[in-house]
Image: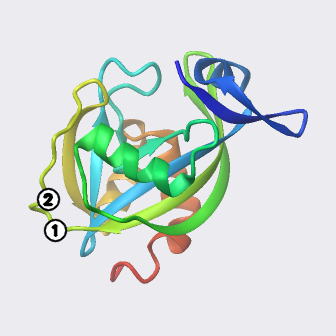
Amino acid sequence: MALIPAWVNGVLQPIEKLEVHQLGLRHKAVSVFVMAGDRVLLQRRAPGKYHTPGLWANTCCTHPEWNEDPLTCAIRRLDEELGITGLIPEFRDRVEYRADVGGGLTEHEVVDIFSAFATTDLTLRPNPDEVSQTAWVGLGDLVGQVEQQPERFTPWLRIYLAEHRASIFTGLTKD
């Protein structure tokens, strides 16, 4: 597994990803929301993912490699997870959260959140090791679905919508 940037005793260090989650260490992450009008491109995590398999998440989310710039990471993972190329994400916010993701694993992330704009006919080539399904969902509909059936969605998507929706989506949609 990859080495990702995590803080240990206040010092940023490259730590193996699984160990970071087992210990619940604070670490860097990147999340991207691809938008088409008021619709958000969601992905359903592949069944083989080591945490939160089969749950719906934002367009893509990951951890930057050691010394990788967040924007470079966002562009790389759009391609690796969904086969999306040619989009230039824009920085929206940096948020921090801590969430139990099951199996004794904890996400304690400092996340650079990006948005990118596309059309719903965007060519997608989902990597089956990462993504089992995609869907375009209106932001208002997504908020309602998460409120009604939170267990279908990743903890971080629930947190983003409940606590950071304004900073992520203001100016991007009518919602």
Q: Which residue is at 20% across, 44% downward?
A: 134
For numbered disc 2, what is the local secondary structure? loop
Name of the residue lying farthest toward the right: 9
The residue drawn where x is 64% and y is 58% is: 95
Q: Is residue 81 above or below residue 84?
A: above
- Tell whether label 1 touches label 2 (CB within 8 Å): yes
Q: Which residue is mark 1?
A: 119
Q: Position of residue 9 (x, y in %)?
A: 90, 33
From mark 2 to mark 1, how far is it between C-alphas?
6 Å
Quadrant of the rendered image containing residue 32: bottom left
Q: Residue at x 41, y 36 (%)?
A: 151
Q: Quadrant of the C terminus?
A: bottom left
Specify the amino acid type for callout 2. Leu
- The residue lying furthest to the front in this view is 67
State the residue position of label 2.
122
Along the line of sight, the residue nearer the viewer: 56 or 119: 119
**Where residue 37 sits in the image (x, y, percent)?**
24, 75
Q: Residues within 10 Å of mark 2 (few under 14, many from 20)?
A: few
24 shown above or below 145: above
Q: 7 left or right of 153?
A: right
**Label 1, residues with CA under 10 Å away: few <14, some 14-19, many ≥20:** few
In the image, residue 175 sits, relative to residue 72, either above or below, namely below
Task: Name the side, left or right, on which 58 lies relative to 134.
Answer: right
Could you say which is closer to the camera, residue 108 or residue 159? 108
